[in-house]
Amino acid sequence: MGLGVLEDDHLEHVPGTALLTDVLGADTSVLRHDKGRNSDVLLVPQPSNSPNDPLNWPLWKKDVMLFLICIDTAVVGAWGPMISPGYAMMSEQFHMSYNALNGGLGWGVFVIGVSCFFTQSLAVIWGRRPIFLLGNLLLFISSVWAYFAHSYRSLLASRLVGCVGMSPFEVLVTSTIADLYFVHQRGVRLAAWGLCLSIGVGGGTIISGYIIQDLGWNWTYGICAVIYGVWIVVLFFFCPETAYRRDAVLNTDLGTEDKAAELAAVKPSADTIERAETNVSEIEPKHSYWNDLQIFHGRVSDDPFWKVLTRPLMMLVFPQVIFSFFAYGLTTSWLVVVGSVLAQIFTVPPYNFSVSGVGLVAIAPLIGAIIGAFISGPSADFVAKAMSRRNNGIYEPEFRLVIIVVTLVLGGMSFFGFGMSLQAEDPWIGPVIFYGLQYFSVGFMSIAVYGYLTDCHRDKAPEAFAAINLRNIYSFGMNYFVSAWISSQGPKDVFCIVGGVHVFICLTAVPIEVFHVSRNCRGKFRQNGPVSMLCHHKSSIHYMTRLTAMKLPSGFHDRAAIGLKAATLSRQKSPSCILARSGQLVMSKIKAVCEHLSQELPNKVVLPCHDEYAAIQASYFSLQEREISPACVVTPKTTADVVTTVQALVEHEIPFAVRAGGHNLNAGAANIEAGVTIDLRGLNQISLNEDLSVVSVGGGARWGEVYSSLEPFGLAVAGSRDEAVGVGGLILGGGMSYFSGRKGLVCDNVDNYEVVLASGEVVNANREENRDLWTALKGGAGNFGIVTRFDLRVWRQGLFYGGVVVSSLATVDAQLEAFAGLAADFDRHAAIILSVSWNQVQQAYGVFCNMMYTAEGVEDPPALRPFTQVQPQFLNTMRVASLREFAIETSKHAVKEARNQFATTTFKVNLPLIQEAYRLWHQSVSSITTIEGASWALVFQPIPAPFLEAGGGEQSNTLGLRPSDGPHVLIMLAYSWKKKADDSTMTAAAQKLIHDIDAASQRAGLFSPFRYLNYAAGWQDPIAGYGEESVRQLKAVSRKYDPRGVFQRQCPGGFKVFKSGE
């Protein structure tokens, strides 16, 4: 045989094997041939002489009818997936998760698979025409229904009705092609049908994306309703019945004994055919056009309905059908599955496509399908004819399978590439091209299997295709868990597994093609064979009963139970959209916990496809934190909500992060990739006690909210100098305020902390209760639990003097000298932040001095005059105002929408060292001048003895600073830039500058190990700077209140006590 197909010397003629071309020594003159260039091609099957035999219709009539059916098929193909670009929008409307919506509407695929049994049975008995008309009618009704549907249940019901209407186009089009065309003509027509189906699936999604975005998802059904209404009329008038009762002898393949020498034996059969044709032509006049318009033409089969209904299941014992089920059914099912998760993949970072953008992704498979159809159909017919000629004129259905080599190579490549490109977050063009390649390659598989199965079982084609369309049930099952699978393992693993299965299935065509596996079985299971009789004998039902009663392999029931449990879990009520990828897709365990929390805390779990999710991400001060994408964000409103969240996360060992204001600049400190972020900003309750001495503030409040609440009462609190900073982050890092000279550090003004521990227990930490925890929280950051409330001391405070002065760099020496004097001999009412900066955009230097004097009724105090009266000045906002107004002013000067970072160091007050630090900074500017959007500022702040004395003395906190150590200068390097590509350059420059300043302070004998935690960069170790005794105490407190180390391991962001000193 041709192309390496091995010859078999033992089998008689089998179904599907046919004489297709004239060969030397074969007398085929009595048989009908094609015309023109294919005049040597025998017509298989041989047509009768009746003018009513569809095989005898003019080719133009056949092609027009097929064209109309294919147009209808395109609209049917669009009907199923056309709303998928709007799944995210619909999940919001119906308050369902993406997974639940996708899986629920996936019931339609299951209905198609089941209804195909009934569709094919009715078509076998009553013909194709009434079933096509009924299918269009059901699609029209369901589309009208869906257009007016305003609930999920109504939409689902309408789609189930429509899916029944879709089933004729799954099983009857191939049968209709077999009714109308000869074997050598079917490849191109099957490709045309497959092309229209692909155009519908792909093109419909493109168009529907814009319809959904502009008009709403209902209108997709409204437009389909109009089309189906028109097409009912078109099919009625232009598509007559194609099922035809012909003599049994005409339904044979006109095969031979597989040896050219024995072709002469065909002659007697041909004479029989001729006699049969003559008799038919004498008694059957041509039907009129009006007769063809009848919907029913009587029964076209005398078989009982129940027997026809069970045939698809019986067909599954045929190896050809089993192979076709796996080769076509499973392979094409994956295209449906991929289409159903496009919104999950492309509506989230890094792609962030709109609804219409997701629809446009379908352009690639549309192009791939069109190109594939134009190549695969003619290729299939060409290969069949070429191999038949090389095979002594004998055609074998297995010749159709040769083109699967295209599917093997390009299909495997497409699935592997799709997964890998998504995992690597390649530009969108990469995965989209691989998506198009999937459709191109699978088109060859479709044509090969359509032709192969039709030629093997032409007389049972509807039953055969109903059997392989059980793959819709597989697609239905996949829809339920594919999203979770992708979320669990990531796209690379999932689609590499799919690609591996795809390649294996394609390779099974080799033994079928080369070693006659299928052909041998066709010989053994031919018309009178025992297995074939299952489709006709009364014992078929008994046989099926025996099959279902068979003892199953060991372990089967356990695996089934596991599968059932997984399916049940996937159908559980879930949050309003599916968890999406960002950087890396989240683990299934995390997804399950997020779903659990969404049920426990309704409307308090935010997922990536929510609008609120983007707003939460955008609320972080620095772009570095915005680039981290959690699997979900929990937004508790009460302490009880935090308890519920912590218990779930700890029980399932889910990594998490805790944020308040989101001002920490270190990536991962207040956000977590593919974990759970607890956003405390909903915990912003603020209340005063009865004697107005203590304000209780929720752990997620911002200082601006606190100041606004206290201002009407004429009260103040030690808090941030920036109104946008969160209460929790500032206090747990120590905290400096305008009142530090009078009141000490912010953490020293906390009377009580309410803390949720890793165990879920809520404790208070104060001077009398859990005092060790109370002390540890003053600078110990988030190492021990989640603080849900701070009780802060307040006092009477009126308006005071302050503002900002911006001056020339020429004034820097005078201001540094004045700063050193103030730091050494500090006025308790003064507060000052002196900075020198360089800006790449303006290519300019400047000196900024933010200063306050908190004694009421004092303007332009002597302590601040060296800074307020410096000249030349560019800006001076000094005035008397409220704490709230000054905090707002400070916030306005912050650099936003940039990659912000701090780094810090400390040394003892010394003017020459302060001047050396400035010189080193000025010198370092040259290393970052080419960085786009760079800002480079060195900030000087005093830490005088009054700061520490006012806070309670030597052991008031864990920071390790003591009044006896004398005054210090706190250095902060504040720098920002635009591009992620410049991260390493800016970090290296910062590290070098801090190192150089530390080296200078060490040479001068003025070095201090203290690093202010709220200014520390991720590469620094501020907790170690507290000193060995403080670190030992912090570790002891951690072991006591968090014995499992939850806030060390599961909450990895920020500075950890057990990592200090590493």
Image (cartoon, rainbow, N blue to C red):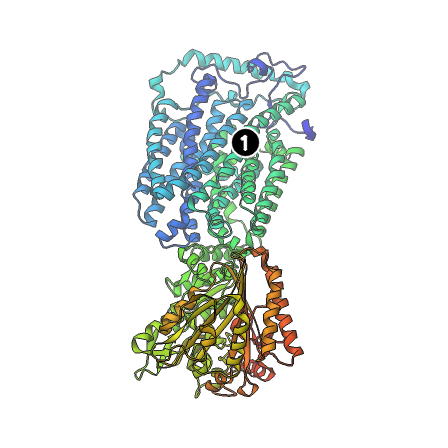
Above or below, comparing residue 14 to residue 965 in the picture: above
Q: Residue at x 61, y 61 (%)?
A: 926
Q: Amino acid at mark 1?
A: Ile
Q: Residues within 10 Å of mark 1 (few under 14, many from 20)?
A: some
Q: How far across and how far down the image is residue 542, in percent?
A: 48, 42
Which residue is drawn at the image coordinates 41% and 13% (left, top)? 283
Front-lying residue, 467 or 443: 443
Numbered disc 1: secondary structure: helix
Identify the image quadrant of the N terminus: top right
In the image, residue 641 above or below residue 495 = below
Residue to which mark 1 is pinned: 371
Q: Quadrant of residue 928?
A: bottom right
Residue 984: horizontal and vertical position, in percent? 61, 60
Asked whether residue 520 appears in the rendered view, the answer is yes
Name the one closer to the observer, 304 or 928: 928
Q: Position of residue 248 (x, y in %)?
A: 50, 22
